Image (cartoon, rainbow, N blue to C red):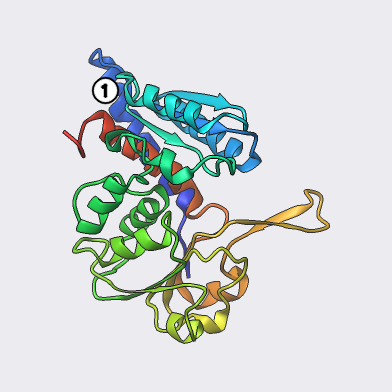
Amino acid sequence: MELIDGKKIGEEIKKEIAAKVAAIIDAGGEPPHLAAILVGEDAASQTYIASKERACKAVGFTSSVYRHRADITEDELLEVIDFLNNDPDVNGFILQLPLPKHINADKVLQRIAPEKDVDGFHPVNVGRLALGLPSYLPATPAGIMLLLERYNIKTEGKRCVVLGRSNIVGTPMSLLMSRKSNPGNSTVTLCHSKTENIAGITKQADILIAAIGQPGFVKADMVKKGAVVVDVGIHRISDNSEKGYYITGDVDFENVAPKCSYITPVPGGVGPMTIVSLLLNTFKAYNHEIFS
């Protein structure tokens, strides 16, 4: 069994990005600029935005955060999005989710210009992904593809099972793994909460990607020997330790890991790759690689 070390791979890729940004600055150019809109005081969102700012600083990007109170109106938020859409100094930006309940998330996300949608959530980018056209890929699925590539994990012709059908992870992951690409070219089954006999399906998987949002959902008897297991879940579980909690994923790691050829730990597996993928999307936006 080999651990897929997302932290190590993420640091390698950030060094590669930093070298490219340094070359741009040495040539007299401006660095890429990634912005974020943060509404309200959600603790997880604030942690993610802080991580994004640190990552931008590490690679030499310009980073800015537009912070707004939770009672901002939908129209006011749309004005902020329009401002960033029209700001030539901003290459890409994200709207941090979740949003307050009085704001229609679908409506405001669709207001983001597709060429600046480095989260890959706009219908234009989702449609381009579905058609196999160049697009900004959602950060977590893109990060998983990078891990499979960097670890030279064979995917062609393999049976891939994706647990979870969210628009952020599961659905785009299933599309990417079925593409004519490397990684890719897998035979993909997408399972969800209504799938019957999930264990019977997962036991057939050469590559199992768990993004179902339930801690410890994947048990050892659901995984075949030699499988590659990618755990997207991250959950904070209260306990009596000094910290008062521990972090776990969607996979019962202790019992599943001995059966695997490769497995991602939680934390330190998929998580670090999410922000790296966001940086790569921003660099593509800076270079007009998707929308020329």
**Would residue 11 be seen by someone viewing this image from the given angle?**
no
Q: Position of residue 88 (x, y in %)?
A: 29, 19
**Is 237 rendered above or below residue 226?**
above
Residue 177 or 84: which is nearer the viewer? 84
**Is 105 rendered above or below residue 212?**
above
Give residue 132's quadrant in the image.
bottom left
Residue at (59, 40) in percent of width and height: 100
138 left or right, relative to 272:
left
Helix, strand or loop for disc 1: helix
**Is 271 rendered above or below residue 226?**
above
Residue at (49, 34) in percent of width and height: 52
254 left or right, relative to 77:
right
Q: Residue furthest top?
A: 28
Quadrant containing the C terminus is top left
Q: Which residue has dot 1 on it?
A: 23
201 left or right, relative to 132:
right
Residue at (28, 29) in percent of width and height: 20
Q: How many marks?
A: 1
Q: Residue furthest left?
A: 292
Residue 86 or 34: which is nearer the viewer? 86
Residue at (49, 86) in percent of width and height: 197
Q: Residues within 10 Å of mark 1 (few under 14, many from 20)?
A: few
Q: Amino acid at mark 1?
A: Ala
Q: Position of residue 220 (x, y in %)?
A: 56, 80
**Would residue 242 be seen by someone viewing this image from the given angle?**
yes
Q: Position of residue 77 (x, y in %)?
A: 48, 29
Give residue 169's quadrant in the image.
bottom left
Q: Position of residue 2 (x, y in %)?
A: 46, 65
